[in-house]
Image (cartoon, helix red, strand yellow):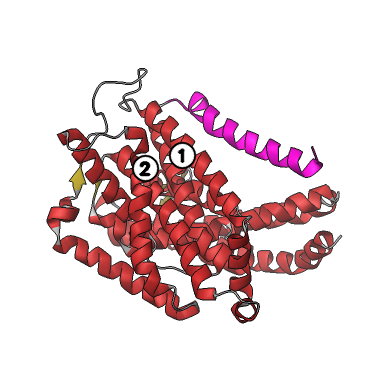
C-alpha cells in the first residue's frame, strides 16, 4: 500500500470514527439533535459545493432540491403509515434523493443552458418561483403549516424503530459517511474532472469535444440527488416539512457557510456545515444580532482569507510540515489577539445599539462578556469605538507585515 493510500485510509477511518464516537462523547438530547443536524448539513453543503466549488456554478436557489427531497420523503412516510406503500424507513432518504433528482432533471435542463451570472439569476428566479408555487398547492405542500408524519412505523426490526434520537442519528451518520465518500469519488471520475475543466475553461473543453452544457447538466443531477438525500434525512429527523425549506433564505445559508468553510477544498463545506448548525442554534441563543455577525464574518473571510477556513488550515498545515510555524507563530498570535480585540469593540457597540433600539424597555444596562455596560453612557461608546479603531488599525499594519512572510513560507 502506497503512502497516499495509507493517508487516505487514515483520514476516512478518522472520519468514520468521529461520526461513530460523537454520540458517546455528547450523549444529551440537545447534543444528539445538533449532531443529526450537522450530518444533514454536511451532505447538503457538499452537494451544493459540487456545483460551486467543482463546477464554478453559483446557485441562489439550490434549497429547492433539498426541499423537494424532503417533501418526497414526508409523503412517503405518510403513505407508509396509511398502509398504501411498504418500504423500510431506512430507505426513505433515498426516496428524497429521487425527489431532488427529479427536480434537478426538470429545472436543471433550463438553468444549465447558461453559465456565470445568467445561471445565478435563473436559479434565483426559479427558487423563488418554486417557493411561491408551494404555497399555492396546499394539498401537495401543506401550505404555511407544512406537512407532518411519524417516522415510527410498524413493528421494530432488530429493536430499531427510529423512535429514539440516537437511532435516527445513527442512520444519518451512515448516510453522511456514504454520501461523503460517494461525492468524493465523483470528483475523481472523468465527469468530475471534466467539470473542473468546464469551470476553468469551457471553450477549451468544447474544443476537445466535450459539451460544457451536458457536463454541467449531469453534475447538476448528481448535486440534486444528494441535496434530495439531505432533505429526506431532514424529514426523518424533524418529522415535519414546510415551504420554508424551499426558500431563498435556506439557499443563502448553504452558499454563505460553504464559502466560509472553503469552497475550493472538498472538506471546506463540512467545516461550514458545522458552523451553520452551531451558529443557528447556539449563537442565536446568545445574541439577537447573530445574523449581523454572520454577515460580517462572511465579508471578513472573503476579503482576508478567500480560501475560507479550510484554506487557512491547509496553509497552516503546509507551513507546519515545512517547519515554518516557529517562524510564524509570533505574527499569527499578534493577528489573532488584535482580531479578538477589534471584534470585542465592534460587538460591544452592536450590543449597545441593539439594547437601545430593540430592548429599550428593559433599561440601558446590559451584560457583555461579564462586563456591565450602559448603552446610554458616552464613556462606554467612546471606549468601545477606541478599542475597535485601535485594534483594527494595528491589525491592518500587522497583516501588511505578516503577508509576505506567510507567502514566503507557503512557497518553500
Horizontal side, residue 301 vs residue 351: left or right: right
Q: Residue furthest left?
A: 139
Numbered mark located on residue 22 in the image: none
Badge count? 2
- The CA span between labels 1 and 2 is 8 Å
- The one nearer the camera, 240 or 28, is 240
Q: Which residue is mark 2?
A: 93
Above-or-below relation of 121 to 335: below
What residue do we see at 29% from left, 35% from top? 87
Q: Let me know if residue 113 is in the magenta part.
A: no
Residue 197 sits in quarter: bottom right
Horizontal side, residue 207 vs residue 385: left or right: right
- The one nearer the camera, 281 or 62, is 62
Horizontal side, residue 245 vs residue 81: left or right: right
Label 1 or label 2, whichever comes before in sequence order: 2
Q: Which residue is mark 1?
A: 175
What residue do we see at 73% from left, 64% from top? 398
What residue do we see at 34% from left, 58% from top? 102
- Measuring from the top left, give residue 226's x and y in whole percent: 44, 51
Residue 304 sits in quarter: bottom right
Q: Which residues are magenta?
A: 1-27
Q: Say which quadrant the C terminus sits in.
A: bottom right
Asked if the residue at tag 2 contacts the one at tag 1, i.e. Cβ–Cβ closer than 8 Å, the answer is yes
Q: Let me know if residue 9 is in the magenta part.
A: yes
- Measuring from the top left, give residue 203's x and y in whole percent: 61, 82
Residue 385 seen in render = no
Q: Main secondary structure of the magenta part?
A: helix
Above-or-below relation of 174 to 276: above
Check disc 1: other Cα within 10 Å, few if <14, some if 14-19, many if 20+. Answer: many
Above-or-below relation of 271 to 236: below
- Measuring from the top left, give residue 247's x and y in whole percent: 30, 62
Amino acid at each position: 500500500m502506497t503512502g497516499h493510500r495509507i493517508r487516505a485510509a487514515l483520514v476516512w477511518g478518522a472520519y468514520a470514527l468521529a461520526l461513530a464516537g460523537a454520540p458517546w462523547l455528547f450523549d444529551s438530547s440537545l447534543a444528539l439533535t445538533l449532531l443529526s443536524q450537522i450530518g444533514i448539513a454536511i451532505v447538503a453543503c457538499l452537494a451544493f459545493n459540487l456545483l460551486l466549488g467543482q463546477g464554478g456554478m453559483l446557485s441562489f436557489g439550490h434549497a429547492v432540491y433539498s426541499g423537494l427531497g424532503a417533501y418526497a420523503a414526508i409523503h412517503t412516510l405518510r403513505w407508509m403509515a396509511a398502509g398504501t406503500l411498504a418500504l423500510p424507513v431506512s430507505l426513505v432518504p433515498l426516496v428524497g434523493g429521487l425527489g431532488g433528482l427529479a427536480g434537478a432533471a426538470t429545472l436543471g435542463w433550463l438553468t444549465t443552458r447558461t453559465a456565470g451570472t445568467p445561471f445565478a439569476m435563473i436559479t434565483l428566479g426559479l427558487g423563488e418561483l418554486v417557493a411561491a408555487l408551494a404555497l399555492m398547492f396546499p394539498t401537495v405542500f401543506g401550505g404555511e403549516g407544512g406537512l407532518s408524519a411519524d417516522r415510527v412505523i410498524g413493528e421494530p426490526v432488530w429493536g430499531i424503530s427510529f423512535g429514539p434520537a440516537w437511532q435516527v442519528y445513527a442512520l444519518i451518520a451512515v448516510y453522511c459517511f456514504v454520501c461523503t465518500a460517494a461525492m468524493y469519488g465523483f470528483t475523481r471520475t472523468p465527469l468530475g474532472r471534466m467539470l473542473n475543466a468546464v469551470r476553468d475553461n469551457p471553450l477549451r473543453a468544447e474544443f476537445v469535444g466535450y459539451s460544457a452544457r451536458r457536463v454541467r447538466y449531469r453534475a447538476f443531477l448528481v448535486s440534486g440527488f444528494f441535496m434530495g438525500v439531505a432533505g429526506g434525512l431532514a424529514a426523518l429527523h424533524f418529522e415535519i416539512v414546510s415551504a420554508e425549506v424551499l426558500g431563498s433564505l435556506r439557499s443563502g445559508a448553504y452558499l454563505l457557510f460553504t464559502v466560509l468553510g472553503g469552497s475550493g477544498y472538498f472538506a471546506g463545506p463540512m467545516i461550514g456545515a458545522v458552523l451553520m448548525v452551531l451558529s443557528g442554534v447556539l449563537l442565536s441563543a446568545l445574541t439577537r444580532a447573530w445574523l449581523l455577525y454572520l454577515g460580517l464574518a462572511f465579508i471578513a473571510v472573503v476579503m482576508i482569507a478567500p480560501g475560507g477556513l479550510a484554506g487557512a488550515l491547509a496553509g497552516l498545515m503546509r507551513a507546519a510540515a515545512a517547519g515554518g510555524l516557529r517562524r510564524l507563530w509570533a505574527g499569527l498570535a499578534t493577528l489573532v489577539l488584535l482580531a479578538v480585540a477589534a471584534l470585542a469593540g465592534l460587538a460591544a457597540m452592536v450590543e449597545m445599539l441593539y439594547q437601545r433600539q430593540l430592548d429599550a424597555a428593559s433599561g440601558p444596562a446590559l451584560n457583555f462578556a461579564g462586563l456591565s455596560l450602559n448603552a446610554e453612557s458616552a464613556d462606554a461608546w467612546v471606549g468601545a469605538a477606541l478599542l475597535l479603531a485601535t485594534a483594527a488599525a494595528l491589525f491592518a499594519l500587522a497583516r501588511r507585515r505578516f503577508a509576505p512572510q506567510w507567502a514566503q513560507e507557503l512557497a518553500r
